[in-house]
């Protein structure tokens, strides 16, 4: 099959799976997940074939696979939509396909496929376990998710959106995929919509990202009207870029490229949960864990960064924009890392770490470290998916314990309820450890080290404040990761539930293993050439390949020992300090970092509530609806009512009644009545009298005529 | 005065007297009989006018059929043989006045008409009025249509009369 | 010869007498009698005008015949009505039959 | 067949009315017969207009399928019918929505005969506006559409129907008063009401000459405003919009479907068909004001919608918001007529009219479905209904997101085209209108959250109040709408191409 055709086909199987499940197989759980996983597999297969074929092409950057069709007629021309696989797309496709497939498989186990239906499970609430009678005594086992099929439908649709976003050759279809993912994110966060927190989180996620989306839409419209095209290949030609850079925008001191870049970047801020639109991502952890892993760690939020990377040639045209991007990224990286220190929910820690790591990528982009950003994007997708799936496995194991003890008020996600899980869940522990070390940037072996090191090296070379910020953030990352590992897996079980935790089924552990391989191995493709000892052993393939996407291939950095040392120190130091501090901590009270402002995320939710949500609700209801519409406009309208009625009354009382009615109306009626009253006497009903009268008249008229004619 | 004139005057006066009795007599049965007399007088007048067919029809149809019908009707609509109370309206005088005025008016018109003094020419000897009348009544060129319409009218009237007078009980 | 005017005057007198009867009699049958008189006066006129006009034109007599027919019809229907009313209201007095008001 | 092919438009136009007259002779108690008869009959115009759609030559300029019959010779007014890409789209929308609305009203049990007849008459009224090329006939149909709608609201509406129907009727009639006078003015000036002839003569008038003692520009300005107010009330443009929530809320379900789906389009159609071609100069001058009002409609419509607790009123206000985009596109086209940007904006506006017809009709229908079962429209009284009615929930989510403008569904295409077209022309207004787009999301999610999500309101789960799932007939109503929503969202070119060519030729 031609590669172009194949690219077109990549997003389709999950979409098809969505429709098949929704329309036909939603009652059959096994069939539904078979279809969904099968579809994910087909997409994975297609992606891998495309990826392999892309590797074989010489300088793919100049000659990408592309194909497009007429989509929208716009005046004289057509808007063309199509697919494009250049190096950036190829590597993104690679990690997206892997994570998506793994998470699809993981979901089968996570939602307890094959277990009995729950005793009291409700649709829209997490399953609560089922009682089974086995070997003569009753015990409680996990129960299957009531909306099992629906889950696979939704993630199918999501995968469609993600693949669409990746293979699009233009901003508009990219935006289509972008928003479809937003919808799925909304639906999946609110998957257990019976919980108020999930419901609110879903709305919050959708609305917050939508703020970014509308700006992005503006940016797209702006770009389209200036350049007349949205196709990446056409925008990123030298002439177009130069035009964009030379036309001033309506904002002072900013070229139109700068403004467009900013508008598009706001979209990324929303989607990738950067400051100040980061508030939705931690709450999004209300969704099922595979969702957190896929949407809110590996793919969708990466989609925001991917878009920013995609638009890098445009962003880099204006230095103001670049500084803003770098600032936002670096600030978010640090800021989110500090919050993560004080979180006790295993998934929330990961959520903040995701925000922080995305900030790393954005910061890298802002300082022009294109390849480093891509590199970190990929490695992060692998190890963060791994971490989330691991945490899901932990939670699952804990829920086992909860079901065993029957104490449902024990939160299976609170790390202070865990401890000592290393022996109970060995596969989970080792894979989680790999993920955690990758996240911390544990030297040499993990992929996270190589990508983070490259960012730090670039930052050191280009922008020192960013370097310092990121270094601190990296330190904190290592620290809270170790805190998490220590609290969760090491030491002794702190609760009975933790003591009764269980390793999870193979459907869940297999993806963990696969991903941990990728989380380690993927780093080796991007080892800088001049790195001591290891440099040159494996060629720095990534740099050459991904760098080829840009028109001007980025130069490889000279090796510098300062960033290398820094990253070694912060990673190992953070990990060591974390272990030391938390190995004996058994309750939140002993944790010195449970500071109010960290725990409450710097009160951002509260501030937004007071500054935006409450005033807007008030404005909408009171001002727009009650005062403006009901009061003012309808008030004026209602004045017309009494007004016309006044005129009407006036006419009636002073003209109609006296003149028309009394005089003409009643007058003529009265006259008729009066005359009738008198004349009725003539109506005797006696035929002879009538005859006489008729005769009199006849005679009179006859006489008159006779004499008149005579004379 | 010729014999004709004497006969005319006598018959006319008798007829008028009978007619007056018809409208003034208190007994309705007598009135019916006086009507027969009046109708007979008119038949004589027809004869005087050489309208022999009309005279015969007057006697046969009017006296023989219509007057008899009246007598039957009178007898059918009387509670008792004697009539009580006045037979004329309270305002009969006014009626009389009107009739008199009408008569006066008619006389006035007759008086003012130039042809009033016309005399009758002799009937041609070869003229057979009865056969001419018969031909005229059935000739398509003449009066067959009014004649037939009249017959239809008669049939309709008869059916209607039967229907109206039919005792539904 | 009798002049035409005599016939006309006789006819007018007969008509007026009949008219008087129609206008003043209380009994409905008697009113019909008056009507008969009036119809007869018309016939006299028709016959007279025939005789004093063109004798060969038989139209006058034809009309007289038709008047006979109409008179017969009128009498039959009129009497039927009188009898019908008598059955229903037990009276033939025209003044009592004053439904034709208001 | 010759007769049909020679009289396509008049058949489409008058078949509903003829059928309504025939229905007069059907027994009034045979409700089943009446319903199916009306439904079957309303399919005839649909089939005919589909046939017209397929025979239509998008690339040919001018009006096609023209028919002309003398009507009022003394003043040179004739029944002149014809369609171009713009009106054909609207005709298709009308003939599509009417059968669906009739199908949707199978649950109406009172006075079925009168109800169905009114609907069919309504269809004729609406189609007449879209088809007629004669101003006087245009006006006649414009008004004809009001009467059945008035009775539909007044007779089959809910609690506050008297107020709502009165407001609807008087308000729109008040607006059309000026329209009538302006049409008469044109008729007196040019001795014809024919749109084609009129456009030519009207625009070629010497601006320095005088007409009826006023300068041409004065006359034009007066006539312009008379037209604008009539159409603005119908659209409705903020601040003439307050009749809409009342009328929509009180109307019976199918009435709201038609009201939102088609009647609002009459106003926008008037702008496109009459104001832009007849008053290019005035349109240019006042385009800024119109764009301001459109932006206000978008923003305030979204805000007001967000503030509602009544489900149906919420959807009604969303119409204000969505139609704002149509007007914004029209305003941009008024200012920059002839440019490529303007064409794109108009493409978007017309497609938005069609799309809003689909999604608003669907939304109103879905509100009606749940209202029929629960007898409440208060959002607070629902809650967690998704497990009870999963199919309904799915359909509701789908339609809501179409109305929200989710990419991949139809609303996005049109809104994007409008934004794209308007951006270079009214940059600031476009930026502000994004606020409306943001809040579109807010109110849609608010509705979904209150209806489907959340803890289940046990009231609807058991016993006599047990909520029943959407039935086959209701799904049948939604199916064509959903198919079109998705189809236009994925591949809009089949309809957009017709619109685009028409817009290119018109302006």
Image (cartoon, coloured by chain):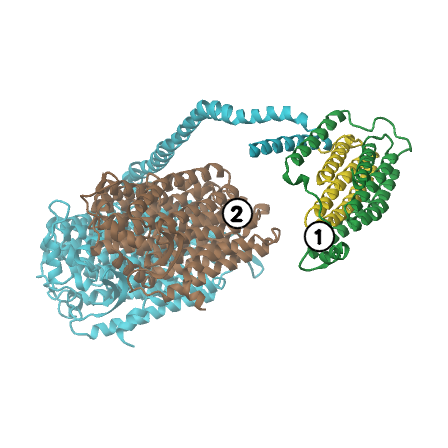
Chain colours: A cyan, B green, C yellow, D brown
D438 over A304 or under it: above or below: above
Mark 2 surroundings: few (<14), some (14-19) or many (≥20) residues within 10 A:
few
Q: Are marks 1 and 2 on the same chain?
A: no
Q: Do the residues labelled 1 and 2 touch (CB within 8 Å)?
A: no
Residue nearest the viewer, comparing D75 with D179: D75
Q: Nearer the viewer, mark 1 or mark 2?
A: 1
Residue nearest the viewer, comparing A690 with D185: A690
Label drawn at residue B143: none
Which corner quadrant holds the C terminus of chain D? bottom left
Q: Where is residue A375 in the image (x, y as percent from the top left)?
A: 20, 61
Residue nearest the viewer, comparing D336 with A289: D336
Secondary structure type for disc 1: loop
Chain hosting mark 1: C
Chain hosting mark 2: D
Q: Position of residue A377 (x, y in %)?
A: 23, 59
Which residue, as the protein is rendered here, is positioned at the far right? B81
Q: Can residue A498 be seen in this view?
A: no
- Which residue occupies 44% across, 55% down? D97
Secondary structure type for disc 2: helix
Label drawn at residue D372: 2
Quadrant for residue D307, please give it: top left
Label drawn at residue C58: 1
Q: Where is residue D353 in the image (x, y as percent from the top left)?
A: 35, 52
Residue nearest the viewer, comparing D117 with A300: D117
């Amino acid at each position: 099959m031609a590669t172009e055709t194949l690219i077109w086909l990549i997003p389709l199987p999950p979409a098809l799976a969505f429709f098949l499940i929704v329309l036909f197989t939603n009652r059959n759980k096994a069939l539904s997940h078979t279809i969904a996983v099968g579809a994910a597999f087909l997409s994975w297969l297609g992606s891998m074939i495309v990826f392999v074929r892309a590797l074989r092409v010489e300088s793919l950057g100049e000659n990408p696979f592309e194909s497009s069709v007429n989509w929208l007629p716009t005046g004289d021309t057509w808007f063309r939509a199509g697919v494009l696989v250049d190096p950036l797309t190829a590597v993104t496709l690679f990690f997206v396909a892997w994570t998506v497939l793994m998470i699809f498989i993981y979901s089968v186990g996570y939602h307890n496929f094959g277990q009995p239906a729950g005793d009291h499970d409700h649709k829209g609430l997490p399953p609560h376990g089922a009682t089974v009678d086995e070997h003569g005594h009753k015990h409680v086992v996990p129960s299957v998710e009531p909306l099992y099929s629906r889950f696979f439908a939704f993630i199918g649709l999501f995968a469609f959106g993600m693949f669409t976003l990746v293979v699009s050759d233009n901003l508009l279809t990219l935006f289509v995929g972008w928003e479809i993912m937003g919808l799925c994110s909304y639906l999946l966060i609110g998957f257990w919509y019976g919980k108020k927190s999930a419901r609110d989180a879903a709305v919050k996620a959708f609305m917050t990202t939508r703020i970014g989306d509308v700006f992005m839409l503006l940016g797209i419209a702006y770009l389209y009207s200036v350049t007349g095209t949205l196709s990446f290949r056409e925008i990123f030609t030298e002439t177009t870029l130069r035009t964009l850079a030379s036309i001033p925008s309506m904002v002072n001191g900013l070229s139109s490229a700068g403004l467009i870049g900013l508008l598009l970047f706001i979209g990324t801020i929303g989607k990738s949960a950067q400051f100040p639109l980061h508030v939705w991502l931690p709450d999004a952890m209300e969704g099922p864990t595979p969702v957190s892993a896929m949407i809110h760690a590996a793919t969708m939020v990466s989609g925001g960064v991917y878009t920013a990377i995609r638009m890098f040639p445009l962003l880099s045209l204006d230095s103001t924009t670049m500084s803003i991007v770098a600032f936002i990224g670096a600030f978010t990286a640090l800021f989110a890392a500090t919050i993560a220190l004080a979180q006790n929910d295993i998934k929330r820690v990961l959520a903040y770490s995701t925000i922080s790591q995305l900030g790393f990528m954005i910061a890298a982009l802002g300082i022009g470290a294109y390849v480093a950003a891509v590199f970190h994007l990929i490695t992060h997708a692998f190890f963060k998916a791994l971490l989330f799936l691991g945490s899901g496995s932990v939670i699952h194991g804990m829920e086992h314990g909860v079901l065993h003890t029957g104490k449902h008020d024990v939160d299976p996600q609170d790390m202070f309820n865990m401890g000592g899980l290393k022996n109970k869940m060995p596969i989970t522990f080792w894979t989680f450890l790999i993920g955690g070390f990758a996240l911390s940037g544990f030297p040499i072996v993990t992929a996270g080290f190589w990508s983070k090191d490259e960012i730090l090296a670039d930052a050191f070379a280009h922008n020192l404040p960013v370097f310092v910020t990121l270094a601190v953030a990296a330190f904190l990352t290592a620290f809270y990761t170790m805190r998490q590992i220590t609290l969760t897996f090491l030491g002794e079980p702190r609760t009975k539930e933790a003591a009764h935790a269980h390793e999870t089924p193979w459907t869940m552990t297999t993806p963990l293993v696969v991903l941990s391989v990728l989380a380690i191995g993927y780093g080796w493709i991007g080892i800088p050439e001049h790195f001591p000892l290891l440099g040159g052993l494996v060629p720095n393939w990534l740099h050459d390949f991904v760098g080829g996407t840009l028109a001007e291939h980025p130069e490889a950095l000279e090796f510098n020992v300062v960033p290398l040392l820094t990253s070694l120190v912060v990673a190992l130091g953070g990990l060591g300090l974390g272990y030391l501090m938390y190995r004996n901590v058994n309750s939140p009270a002993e944790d010195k970092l449970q500071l109010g402002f960290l725990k409450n995320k710097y009160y951002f939710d509260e501030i937004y509530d007071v500054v935006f949500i409450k005033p807007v609700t008030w404005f909408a209801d009171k001002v727009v609806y009650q005062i403006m519409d009901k009061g003012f406009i309808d008030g004026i309208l209602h004045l017309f009512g009494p007004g016309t009625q006044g005129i009407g009354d006036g006419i009636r009382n002073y003209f109609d009644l006296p003149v028309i009615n009394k005089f003409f109306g009643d007058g003529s009626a009265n006259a008729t009545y009066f005359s009738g009253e008198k004349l009725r006497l003539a109506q005797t009903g006696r035929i002879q009298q009538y005859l006489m009268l008729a005769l009199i008249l006849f005679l009179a008229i006859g006489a008159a005529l006779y004499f008149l004619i005579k004379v | 005065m010729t014999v004709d004139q004497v006969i005319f005057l006598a018959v006319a006066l008798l007829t008028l007297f009978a007619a007056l009795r018809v409208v003034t007599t208190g007994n309705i049965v007598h009135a019916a009989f006086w009507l027969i007399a009046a109708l007979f007088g008119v038949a004589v007048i027809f004869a005087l006018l050489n309208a022999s067919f009309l005279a015969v029809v007057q006697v046969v149809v009017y006296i023989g059929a219509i007057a008899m019908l009246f007598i039957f009707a009178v007898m059918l609509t009387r509670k008792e043989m004697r009539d009580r109370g006045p037979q004329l309206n309270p305002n009969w005088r006014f009626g009389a006045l009107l009739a008199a005025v009408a008569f006066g008016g008619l006389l006035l018109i007759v008086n003012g008409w130039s042809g009033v003094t016309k005399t009758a020419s002799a009937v041609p000897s070869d003229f057979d009025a009865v056969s001419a009348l018969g031909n005229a009544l059935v000739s398509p060129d003449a009066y067959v249509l009014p004649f037939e319409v009249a017959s239809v009218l008669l049939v309709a009237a008869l059916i209607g009369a039967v229907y109206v007078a039919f005792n539904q009980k | 010869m009798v002049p035409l005017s005599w016939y006309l005057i006789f006819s007018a007198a007969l008509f007026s007498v009949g008219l008087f009867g129609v206008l003043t009699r209380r009994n409905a049958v008697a009113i019909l009698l008056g009507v008969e008189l009036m119809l007869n006066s018309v016939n006299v006129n028709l016959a007279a005008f025939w005789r004093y006009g063109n004798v060969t034109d038989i139209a006058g007599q034809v009309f007289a015949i038709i008047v006979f027919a109409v008179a017969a019809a009128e009498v039959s229907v009129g009497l039927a009505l009188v009898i019908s009313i008598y059955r229903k209201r037990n009276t033939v007095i025209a003044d009592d039959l004053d439904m034709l008001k208001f | 067949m010759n007769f049909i092919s020679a009289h396509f438009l008049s058949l489409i136009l008058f078949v509903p009315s003829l059928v309504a007259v025939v229905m007069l002779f059907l027994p009034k108690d045979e409700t089943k017969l009446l319903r199916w008869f009306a439904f079957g009959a309303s399919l005839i115009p649909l089939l005919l207009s589909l046939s017209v759609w397929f025979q239509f030559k998008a690339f040919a300029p001018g009006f096609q399928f023209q028919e002309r019959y003398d009507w009022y010779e003394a003043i040179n007014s004739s029944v002149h019918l014809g369609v171009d890409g713009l009106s054909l789209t609207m005709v298709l929308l009308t003939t599509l929505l009417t059968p669906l609305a009739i199908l949707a009203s199978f649950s109406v049990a009172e006075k079925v005969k009168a109800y169905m007849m009114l609907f069919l008459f309504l269809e004729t009224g609406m189609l007449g506006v879209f088809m007629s090329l004669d101003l006087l006939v245009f006006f006649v149909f414009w008004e004809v559409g009001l009467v059945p709608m008035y009775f539909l609201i007044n007779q089959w509406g809910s609690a506050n129907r008297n107020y709502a129907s009165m407001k609807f009727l008087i308000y729109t009639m008040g607006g059309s008063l000026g329209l009538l006078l302006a049409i008469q003015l044109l008729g007196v000036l040019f001795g014809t009401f024919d749109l084609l002839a009129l456009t030519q003569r009207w625009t070629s008038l010497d601006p320095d000459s005088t007409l009826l003692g006023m300068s041409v520009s004065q006359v034009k300005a007066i006539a312009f405003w008379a037209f604008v107010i009539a159409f603005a009330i119908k659209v409705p443009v903020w601040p003439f919009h307050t009749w809409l929530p009342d009328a929509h809320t009180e109307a019976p379900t199918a009435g709201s479907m038609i009201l939102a789906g088609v009647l609002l389009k009459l106003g926008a159609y008037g702008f496109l068909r009459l104001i832009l071609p007849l008053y290019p100069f005035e349109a240019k001058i006042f385009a800024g004001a119109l764009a301001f009002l459109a932006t206000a409609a978008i923003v305030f419509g979204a805000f007001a919608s967000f503030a509602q607790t009544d489900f149906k009123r919420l959807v009604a206000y969303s119409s204000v918001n969505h139609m704002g985009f149509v007007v914004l596109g029209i305003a941009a086209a008024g200012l920059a007529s002839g440019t490529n940007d303007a064409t794109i904006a108009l493409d978007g506006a017309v497609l938005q009219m069609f799309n809003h017809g689909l999604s608003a009709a669907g939304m109103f229908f879905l509100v009606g479905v749940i209202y029929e079962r629960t007898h409440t429209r208060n959002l607070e009284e629902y809650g967690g209904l998704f497990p009870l009615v999963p199919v309904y929930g799915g359909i509701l989510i789908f339609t809501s997101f179409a109305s929200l403008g989710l990419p991949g569904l139809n609303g996005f295409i049109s809104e994007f085209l409008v934004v794209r077209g308007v951006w270079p022309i009214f940059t600031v207004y476009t930026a502000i209108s994004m606020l409306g787009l943001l809040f579109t999301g807010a109110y849609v999610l608010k509705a979904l959250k209150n209806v489907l999500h959340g803890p289940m309101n046990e009231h609807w789960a058991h016993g006599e109040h047990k909520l029943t799932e959407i039935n086959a007939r209701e799904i049948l109503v939604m199916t064509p709408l959903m198919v079109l929503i998705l189809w236009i969202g994925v591949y809009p070119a089949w309809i957009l191409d017709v619109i685009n060519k028409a817009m290119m030729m018109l302006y």
